Image: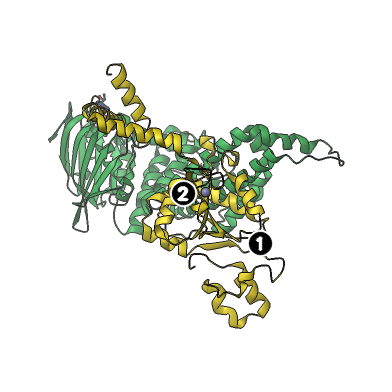
Chain colours: A yellow, B green
Amino acid sequence: MYDGAVQDLIDELGRLPGIGPKSAQRMAFHLLAADPVDVTRLVGAIQAVKDKVRFCDVCGNVAEGERCRICLDPRRDAHAICVVEEPKDVVAIERTREFRGLYHVLGGAISPMDGIGPGELRFAELMTRLASDEVTEVIVATDPNLEGEATASYLVRLLSSFEGITVSRLASGLPVGGDLEYADEVTLGRAFEGRRVMSRARPPAPTADPRAAEPAADPSAAEPAADQTAASAREAKTAYAPTGSE
Amino acid sequence: MHVRHLSLASFRSYDRAELPLVPGVTTLVGENGQGKTNLVEAIGYVATLASHRVATDAPLVKFGADQAIIRCAVVRDTREQLVELEINPGRANRARLGRAAQTRPRDVLGTLRTVLFAPEDLSLVKGDPGTRRRFVDDLLVARQPRWAGVRGDYERIVKQRNALLKSAAPVLRRGNRGASRPRRPDQEPVDEARASALHTLDVWNSHLSQVGSQLLYARLRILRDLGPHLAQAYAQVSDGAGEARVRYESSLHEGAAARIAGGDVPEPAELAELMLESLERLRAQEVERGVGLVGPHRDDIVLTLGELPAKGYASHGESWSFALGLKLAAYRLLRADLDDDPVLILDDVFAELDSGRRERLAAMIGDCEQVIITAAVGEDVPKSLGGQTFWVKDGEVVPG
Ligand SMILES: Nc1ncnc2c1ncn2[C@@H]1O[C@H](COP(=O)(O)OP(=O)(O)O)[C@@H](O)[C@H]1O
Ligand SMILES: [Mg+2]
Ligand SMILES: [Zn+2]
């Protein structure tokens, strides 16, 4: 144990994720010896994060205003929403450049052991967003571990009542038991591209989506078109127009 | 396979220990409390990443030290593989295979296979179902290391699901009671919290049945393979009457449990269905008690001798023979399907057996690639086994 202030700092640093008691001690003594200017800058950065950064009212991502950078960007495709656990997962997926739609950050995964049930996550906000008929595809990109899978299954069940929405899940190939954020870009990108459809949209009317005329980038929709009746071909295209290729 | 060398640092009572080993029989002789079991415990740890005596790692580290290191040279088909394990209680353990950089400890599984029999194993016969489940699951992992992952996932699902049953019990019970009361048709308010909890429970039910059915299927398969080896090994050790058998007692609903007890092994997909059905039927009870009642973690493996269950009926000697029979059967099963002998470890076994059983056991293990025996009294081990001897005294290991 050290004297008051030093021990307080060690304790606070030790509460940060991934920092054990030894690292906390090393960091504390580093700060003790550091240039006051550097320390002031660090304190300022921490303070600024708490003052300026908040969570996006729409998607739950980190934001500097009411809405995050992605929600404000008019070039993003509002037909697709990718559901992730944490803001850091947004960063990981953005790195792959596979996705041009919007996000929804749940704020964690279902884990009864940690007291986290659906009520603690941002499911209700997602339902509100989906109630506007603009969204046609939801991509579930929760972590490839047990809790992430449970969250995904819960979501898929929840979304089964939305007839006009195609739901897909990131393809396997991600390291099982891991965190999305640790997957490298290539692996994550491939998982994104090869996402597996869990439930297809059932559009009420064949003309529901004007984009039906566009060529579908989904090979499963495009290839067998010759064998399909016009109606079912149209349905397949309407249903699934991946945004990754736009 | 065999262990050519074991080297310890700050493990149990040892500051340092070097134990050169050879194929064939090695006997470690020393009075009680001198550190014999500590040595074989370390070898067992390399094979299973767990001690056969304690559930946590902390007691394995020498008192006062903060980490223990086990190094082990394993020879299989003339190829030698070095394993190094660093045991860090409270932090992640670390592992190294050969000269490669660090790997996850789990990757070490499969490098060394052991079958270890110790006095504690009497609880296989006399103890709780958990001991028998662990025996079977350990055997699965020894055969195919990937089962360590399935088992870990399953345990986590059970924990999550039990936590849910516990925390959501008050909300879920609202429906249980309501269902038995006549409903008023005019108004039936939608209970959102309950619907959400049920929804979440469904998700964990589906996880439990997916992973649980794989584990159950694997257990049933391996027990079916183990059966003949067990009957034979028991007959050889005991030289007595009565056939030793195992019967799987499943927590699935009655019809399914009866099929399984009768020796039927349904495919995993069917087992998953049966598990879901059983969960559905027991939902009210699970909710009432706030704990999961269905799944491989609630099953038992009943041991029978002739017509009678071994537990509660078998004599002390028969119980010993049964426990030993199970371990020898496991040894023979692994030997047969890996085309390679595991290392057989017999800790303090001979003292418990009468001279007839000692000789019979010695005859059974004579052809094993490597056997490591511990004994407080050297004379308890039949001379016919031969091999090398080490004396263990006060944390020193010296060739005899
Ligand atoms: N973590 C530990 N640190 C120091 N000594 C230990 C530790 N764990 C066990 N021991 C000592 O090891 C001895 C038991 O060794 P063990 O191998 O079980 O004996 P035996 O020769 O009877 O098989 C005991 O004297 C015990 O005090
Ligand atoms: Mg001992
Ligand atoms: Zn946003």
Element marked by disc 1: loop
- Are circles 1 and 2 on residues that touch, CB within 8 Å? no
Disc 1 residue type (three-letter): Gly
- The residue indicated by pointer 2 is A145
Whether residue B169 is visible to the viewer of this picture, yes or no, is: yes
Q: In this orientation, which residue lies closer to the viewer: B64 or B81?
A: B64
- The residue indicated by pointer 1 is A164
Element marked by disc 2: loop
Measuring 47% from the left and 43% from the top, which residue is drawn there?
A: A64
Tags 1 and 2 on a common chain = yes
Q: Is residue A94 above or below residue B194?
A: below
Give x and y (percent) for residue B177. 75, 34
Neighbourhood count class around disc 2 (C-alpha, 10 Å): few under 14, some 14–19, many 20 upward: some
Query: Which of the four quarters of the rendered structure image does ligand 1 lie in?
Result: top left
Neighbourhood count class around disc 1 (C-alpha, 10 Å): few under 14, some 14–19, many 20 upward: many
Disc 2 residue type (three-letter): Asn
Where is residue B358, by image quadrant?
top left
Q: Residue furthest top?
A: A3
Give x and y (percent) for residue B253. 64, 47
Q: Residue furthest left?
A: B399
- The quadrant the N terminus of chain A occupies is top left
Give x and y (percent) for residue B356. 32, 39
Q: Is residue A12 above or below residue B291?
A: above
Q: Residue furthest bottom?
A: A226
Q: Is residue A62 above or below residue A165?
A: above
Measuring 63% from the left and 60% from the top, which residue is drawn there?
A: A165
Label placed on residue A37: none
Q: In this orientation, which residue lies closer to the viewer: A212 or B272?
A: A212
Image depth: mark 1 or mark 2 in front: 1
